[in-house]
Amino acid sequence: MGTAQRFGTFSIVAYDPQRTAWGVAVQSRFIAAGAVVPSAEAGVGALASQALANVRFGPEGLARLRGGASAEETVRALIDADPEREHRQLGVVDARGRAASYTGAKCLDFAGHEIGDGFACQGNILFGPAVVRAMARAYESTPGDLLDRLLAALAAGQREGGDRRGMQAAALLAVKAGAGYGGSDRWVDLRVDDHPSPIEELRRVFRLYDLTMLSREDPASRVRIEGDVAAALQHDLAVLGYYTGRLTGSWDASSRAAFGRFVDEHNFENKQRDLGEVWPSVREYLKERAAQETARRTRTAPIVPGALDRGPGAAAPGDRPSSGPEGRP
């Protein structure tokens, strides 16, 4: 980005010691800000590079953190080596949760930062200093885990005026060892590249991702599939065409197979691994989909006889049901 392309941005970098996770959340009047601002690595730390963003700060900063440098040492080394330092803004949190931030003297007003316990908020071309203050207070006071608190910080900053040039893009990047899809460290990596209300859209996308991919519910809330629970799941799976047996309440092999295919085809396989119990959110999702299917059959006149009474999980006439997992990118 050239000197004329400085766009207002506010971000937060943070560390969650209870879950050993690091994250970055950002909103900017700059398209695809999530491709430029955030960087993070599990066990290492997280960075946000903005204002006249130096795209080398991400990989170089993580390399320094990986080598044992603190957040403050990393910020100082990156800024001291940069001839455009007065146009830069940078926030860093290290492996131990120590945070540091830098705002160059030539960043456009309002520009500033606030450092707290395990986090740093920074922004430029803001409506005023209340933006970063509100972000910090929201992060400190919001219940929940790192993800909830990062999203709350973005929303709080926007409520105080946010980027005075408006809204365009938002992103949430969080890393945690083995917590991502397929056991990767990339816990959450979501971007809204261009939207009139990017934070609200990011929240909407996150809710879908949380439902299908994350296991943030209390594990104690999972319910064994038996009796009335099994019968209810059999009913809903039957409505959707996954199950063709009787509603016995006995969680037999055919019931488990039907549930497993539903889990795979609806991308729950990263969350719902044990087919002998069910998460409340998966149970509710299945119930809602069955209700939607029942309403569709009631309200939609069939064009082809029998076309609307099989459910979307049923195989086409003469076809065998899919046996392999469908939840793949």
Image: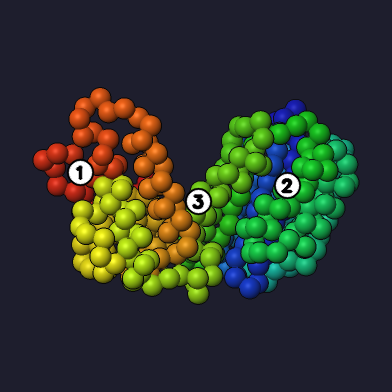
Which numbered disc flags the more N-terminal residue, 1 or 2?
2
- Kindly give the residue lying farthest to the top in the view shown: 303
Q: What residue type is disc 2 on?
A: Ala
At x 48%, y 59%, the residue is 281
At x 28%, y 52%, the residue is 238
Please state which of residues 95 and 305 is positioned toward the viewer in this rendering: 305
Query: Quick one: SS at disc 2?
Result: helix
Disc 3 marks which residue?
Answer: 209
Q: What residue type is disc 1 on?
A: Ala
- Kindly give the residue lying farthest to the front in the view shown: 298
Which numbered disc flags the more N-terminal residue, 2 or 3?
2
Q: In the picture, residue 268 is in which quadrant?
A: bottom left
Q: In the drawing, what numbered circle is on residue 315?
A: 1
Report the Cα–Cα distance between label 1 and label 2: 44 Å
Query: Quick one: SS at disc 3?
Result: helix
At x 75%, y 45%, the residue is 10
Q: In the drawing, what numbered circle is on residue 155?
A: 2
